[in-house]
Image (tube, rainbow, N blue to C red):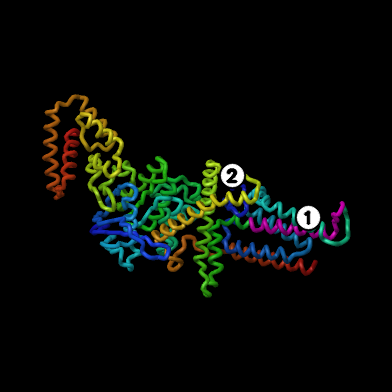
């Protein structure tokens, strides 16, 4: 039931991107997203698309697999394009009833669609090549300076990784409870919104109870294995920058500079 | 020195009402004495609510005695200075495999314990590899725990505990949620650790078959140790076990019923092979006189043995057991 969601899922293979330090990928993704809002010209978009294409090639993840993740945002994409297409005032080039398409609208809509697609593809490249554990590790490491102002960095990242670990388990559980309720005549198919919400109550109550019980068990299991917060902990997979990570930072910097250049020149 | 020593342990669960006032207490353990030697394989049996899980949590300092004392490797669990040392030395595996695996990759989960106690990185890798190999899960090291079977998950949990190099592992009904194959896998893994690495294993279970190979069995009932002894001693007392709402292994039960029906079988049959041997012995028509003779020689041998080990067999239950064992020797001999 949840198998079709590729957005934000790790794709296991070996590639240059997979081996890269997760911190580089995290910083890189943010830089890429910011750069997308910096560029405004066709040349800029071409540059961004080319950069992404290169990354996809480097990631060894099949293009089809990446695009499949786009399905989930297709609806959003269509709406955005329509709004931009028909609601931007300017020189009318096509008309059907009250719908007016302007030249500015057309170019704006295409740019918007490009920007959104690149945004999604760019961030899914990161999640496809980085395990959630690496990602939380990277976050913990990048946020470490915040520890000085008493932000519980380690705890936050531990919570995130536990949440990620339990998502599939709780989903399975939801499925199980749902089936049990259906077997006893519960109606989850109703089109009526109020009925639909009402039918969620017998689903959510047992789900929450079980989640709390799991949390309790897990806390005890963690304590039994000597967990006592971030103090005095060592890392099985410590993050260490290597030559290729520094090179990657260099490439990122170059790309970012190029994006700014397109903005200034074109 | 004992690996685990418990003296007059009492544990009360305190019930509180909504305002946090004490509304009553439930006595889960009332006066347990226990002594486990290093390297032993111990099984703790008991029906639901007999206090066996509460007992387990005392051995890992997850619960603290209301009265009495628990020593793990000579350290008092009430002494907070030793808390982490106790938890490292006495590892714990819980019932639900999903609720004790923390990481999303098998090897990372096994590394969780060593990370917590501050083991250097290279050493963690070494330990993770060794522990996974010890439970036969090395080939699954890169997998997500969600893709493993219940038995495999439980073996990962065991690996996670042995990566901390404990002297003792407590398994709290590790097989309760598993299918028969998974059960066998887990018990085999625990057994192997006990035999090959000399780790003390305390297995809490309500599957009698899992307790057959234990060195010693403790049967809990209403917060007390109701029976203790070797598997042969315990399972020969079919009626007493039934009183405690416990089964005996099916083969033992069958032998018991056959004996009641008049067949000349020993009371302490634990395995299929033993039963087959015993039945064949009956069939070949051993004359009762011969059997009697063998019994008496076995009995004297047994007495010699007990004198040598200095074991005191004074309780009524033990005498009964002794009789059963003699009968067993008699028929095998």
Q: Residue at x 51, y 73 (%)?
A: A150
Q: CA distance from mark 1 to mark 2?
A: 36 Å
Q: Chain of mark 1?
A: A
Q: Which residue is mark 2?
A: A187
User: Relative to residue A173, is residue B79 depicted above or below?
Assistant: below
Disc 2 secondary structure class: loop
Residue B323 placement (x, y as % from top left): 16, 39
> Where's the N terminus of chain B, which quadrant?
bottom left
Count of marks overlaid on the render:
2
What label sits on residue A82 in the rendered view?
1
- Give the percent coordinates (x, y) of residue A58: 64, 55
The quadrant where residue A89 appears = bottom right
Q: Which residues are magenta?
A: A96-124
In the rendered structure, the answer to whether residue B139 lies left or right of residue B226 reads: right
Side of B36 where A85 appears, left or right: right
Which residue is located at x 61 percent, y 58 percent? A126
Is residue A250 left or right of A99 when viewed as pictured? left
Q: Residues within 10 Å of mark 1 (few under 14, many from 20)?
A: some
In-front residue for pair B127/A231: A231
Relative depth, front residue between B328 and B17: B17
The answer to whether the residues at label 1 and label 2 have Cβ atoms under 8 Å apart is no
Specify the quadrant that holds the C terminus of chain B.
top left
Instruction: Provide the major secondary structure of the magenta segment.
Output: helix
- The residue nearer to you, when weighing B141 against B54, is B54
Asked if the magenta segment contains residue A103, the reply would be yes
Secondary element under disc 1, as helix, strand or loop, is helix
Neighbor class of circle 2 (other Cα within 10 Å; few <14, some 14-19, many 20+) is: some
Chain letter of the residue carrying label 2:
A
Q: Is residue B49 magenta?
A: no
């Amino acid at each position: 039931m949840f198998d079709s969601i590729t957005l934000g899922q790790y794709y296991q293979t070996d590639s240059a991107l997979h081996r890269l330090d997760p911190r580089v990928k995290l910083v890189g993704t943010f830089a890429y997203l910011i750069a997308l809002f910096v560029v405004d010209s066709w040349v800029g978009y071409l540059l961004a698309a080319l950069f992404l294409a290169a990354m996809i090639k480097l990631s060894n993840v099949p293009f089809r697999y990446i695009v499949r993740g786009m399905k989930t945002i297709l609806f959003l994409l269509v709406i955005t394009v329509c709004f931009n297409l028909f609601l931007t005032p300017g020189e009318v080039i096509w008309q059907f009833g009250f719908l007016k398409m302007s030249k500015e609208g057309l170019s704006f809509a295409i740019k918007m669609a490009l920007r959104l697609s690149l945004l999604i593809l760019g961030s899914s490249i990161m999640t496809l090549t980085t395990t959630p554990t690496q990602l939380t590790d990277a976050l913990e490491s990048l946020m470490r300076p915040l520890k000085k102002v008493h932000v519980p960095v380690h705890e936050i990242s531990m919570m995130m990784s536990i949440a990620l670990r339990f998502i599939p388990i709780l989903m399975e559980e939801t499925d199980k409870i749902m089936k049990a309720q259906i077997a006893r005549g519960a109606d989850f198919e109703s089109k009526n919104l109020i009925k639909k919400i009402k039918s969620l109550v017998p689903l959510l109550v047992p789900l929450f109870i079980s989640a709390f019980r799991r949390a309790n068990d897990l806390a005890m299991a963690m304590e039994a294995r000597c967990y006592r917060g971030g103090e005095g902990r060592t890392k099985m997979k410590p993050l260490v920058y290597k030559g290729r990570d520094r090179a990657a930072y260099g490439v990122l910097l170059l790309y970012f500079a190029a994006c700014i250049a397109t903005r200034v020149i074109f | 020195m004992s690996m685990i020593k418990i003296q007059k342990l009492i544990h009360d669960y305190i019930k509180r009402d909504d305002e946090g006032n004490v509304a009553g207490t439930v006595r889960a353990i009332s006066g347990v004495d226990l002594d486990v030697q290093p390297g032993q394989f111990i099984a703790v049996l008991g029906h639901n609510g007999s206090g066996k899980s509460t007992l387990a949590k005392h051995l890992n300092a997850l619960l603290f005695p209301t009265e009495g004392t628990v020593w793990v490797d000579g350290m008092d669990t009430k002494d907070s200075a030793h808390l982490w040392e106790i938890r490292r030395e006495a590892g714990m595996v819980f019932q639900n495999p999903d609720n004790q695996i923390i990481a999303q990759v098998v090897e990372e989960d096994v590394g969780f314990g060593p990370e917590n106690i501050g083991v250097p990185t290279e050493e963690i890798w070494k330990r993770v590899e060794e522990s996974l190999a010890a439970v036969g899960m090395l080939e699954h090291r890169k997998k997500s725990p969600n893709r493993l079977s219940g038995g495999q998950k439980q073996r990962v949990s065991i690996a996670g505990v042995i990566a901390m190099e404990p002297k003792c592992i407590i398994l709290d009904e590790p097989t309760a949620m598993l299918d028969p194959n998974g059960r066998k896998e887990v018990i085999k893994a625990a057994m192997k650790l006990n035999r090959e690495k000399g780790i003390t294993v305390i297995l809490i279970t309500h599957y009698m078959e899992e307790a057959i190979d234990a060195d010693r069995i403790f049967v809990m009932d209403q917060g007390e140790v109701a029976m203790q002894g070797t598997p042969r001693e315990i399972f020969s007392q079919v009626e007493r076990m039934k009183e405690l709402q416990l089964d005996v292994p099916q083969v033992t039960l069958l032998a018991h019923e056959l004996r009641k029906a008049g067949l000349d079988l020993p009371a302490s049959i634990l395995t299929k092979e033993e039963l087959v041997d015993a039945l064949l012995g009956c069939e070949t028509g051993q004359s009762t006189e011969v059997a009697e003779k063998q019994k008496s020689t076995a009995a004297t041998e047994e007495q010699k043995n007990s004198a040598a080990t200095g074991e005191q067999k004074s309780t009524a239950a033990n005498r009964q057991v002794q009789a059963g064992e003699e009968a067993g020797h008699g028929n095998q001999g």
